Image (spheres, rainbow, N blue to C red):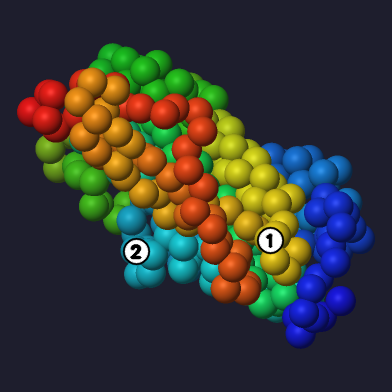
């Protein structure tokens, strides 16, 4: 089977990657939630790759800014891992945190897991997004620090300390127990001219169990797409790429901003189709701009 085949004849898609090695470049233990899901489902082998400091592509502590998009960072990681391992299939995960897209009041985690297949010349993305712990505080005493730590889920969720403010370059990471936290706080407070210490979540995957769960959910999304072949060419990765608004209001029949249909597309050939929504035929009047202006 080559990238020039007219039809890939993948048959049962779970076996399309049987025996293939997927390089996974990570230094934060992400293979623990990705490999147990993909390996038995696809018959592949997920190989953890080292030899490159992925922090060079950006850090959550902002000492090294990420200069590309989240998708591009994942793509670069996968390509680097493939080159280091000498294989044609690569996996990479990239996460981000920001305000929630609804009210902008809560921390929101977006996880992307990419499969790069150099044989077929395709990329398939698995994505999950949802609430994620990501708070911070400026504290001046041990009690305030302890209150923040309890709310943050410490010690399961690790913490980061720095003197004075969020951009201070004197960073203490890897704080994962109460004794270390107390010692790090005392040392950091001595370095702070104001006596205040900036404390935040350590958002690296191995230090953030919630992120690990979300990375697994992104892997589940990736697996669903890999196991869905294009009806025209059989290439894996057939999935929705666009949503079409216009579901009719149940009361007045006017088009609403609710999703009416999805556009599915192949990641390699030009095949596309529009699939009308089947779970609901009409929209709630509360979502109608005419009935509920």
Q: Secondary structure at mark 2?
A: loop
Q: What residue is shown at x 48% (from left), y 43% (from top)?
A: 276
How packed mark 1 is, by other alpha carbons closer than 10 Å (few <14, some 14-19, many 20 or more), is many
For label 1, the residue is 230
User: Is residue 140 rendered to the left or right of residue 204?
Assistant: left
Residue found at x 59% / y 37%: 217
- In the image shown, does 77 or 264 lie closer to the viewer? 264
The one nearer the camera, 125 or 30, is: 125
Q: Classify mark 1: helix, strand or loop.
A: loop
Q: CA distance from mark 1 to mark 2?
A: 38 Å
User: Where residue 268 sits: x, y (%)?
Assistant: 62, 72
Tell me which numbered mark, 1 or 2, is placed earlier along the sequence: 2
In which quadrant will I find the C terminus?
top left
**Position of residue 272 measured from the top left corner of the image (x, y, whole percent):** 54, 63
Picture coordinates of residue 219, whole percent (x, y): 64, 45
The answer to whether residue 62 shows anywhere in this view is yes
**Circle 2 residue:** 65
Q: Are marks 1 and 2 in contact (CB under 8 Å)?
A: no
Callout in the foreground (1, 2): 1
- In this rendering, would 12 be left or right of 154? right
Residue 32 in the image: above or below residue 183: below
Q: Residue at x 38, y 69 (%)?
A: 68
Q: Quadrant of residue 270?
A: bottom right
Q: Which mark is residue 157?
A: none
Report the side of 180 relative to 194 (left or right).
right
Q: Quadrant of residue 120?
A: bottom right
Q: Is residue 8 above or below residue 242?
A: below
- Where is residue 163? Give x, y as percent: 25, 43
Rendered image quadrant of residue 54:
bottom right
Residue drawn at the location 23% of the way across and 21% of the way down:
251
Where the N terminus falls, by quadrant? Answer: bottom right
Q: Is residue 106 visible to us here? A: no
């Amino acid at each position: 089977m080559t990238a020039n085949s007219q039809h890939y004849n993948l048959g049962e898609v779970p076996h399309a990657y049987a025996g293939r090695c997927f390089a996974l470049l990570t230094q934060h233990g992400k293979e623990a939630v990705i490999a147990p899901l993909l390996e038995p489902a696809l018959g592949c082998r997920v190989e953890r790759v080292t030899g490159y400091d992925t922090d060079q592509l950006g850090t959550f502590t902002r000492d090294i800014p990420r200069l590309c998009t989240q998708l591009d960072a994942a793509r670069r990681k996968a390509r680097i891992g493939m080159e280091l391992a000498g294989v044609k299939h690569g996996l990479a995960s990239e996460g981000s945190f920001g305000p929630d897209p609804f009210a902008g009041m809560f921390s929101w985690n977006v996880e992307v897991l990419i499969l790069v297949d150099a044989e077929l010349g395709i990329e398939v993305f698995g994505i999950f997004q949802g609430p994620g712990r990501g708070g911070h505080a400026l504290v001046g005493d041990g009690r305030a620090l302890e209150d923040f730590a309890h709310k943050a889920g410490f010690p399961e969720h690790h913490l980061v300390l720095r003197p004075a403010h969020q951009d201070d370059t004197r960073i203490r990471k890897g704080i994962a127990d109460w004794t270390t936290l107390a010692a790090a706080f005392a040392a950091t407070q001595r370095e702070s001219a104001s006596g205040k210490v900036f404390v935040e979540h350590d958002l690296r995957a191995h230090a953030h169990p919630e992120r690990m769960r979300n990375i697994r959910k992104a892997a589940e999304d990736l697996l669903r797409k890999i196991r869905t072949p294009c009806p025209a060419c059989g290439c894996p990765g057939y999935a929705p790429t666009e949503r079409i608004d216009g579901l009719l209001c149940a009361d007045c029949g006017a088009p609403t901003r609710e999703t009416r249909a999805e556009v599915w597309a192949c990641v390699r050939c030009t095949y596309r189709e529009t699939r009308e929504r089947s779970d609901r035929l009409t929209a709630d009047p509360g979502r109608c701009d005419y009935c509920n202006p």
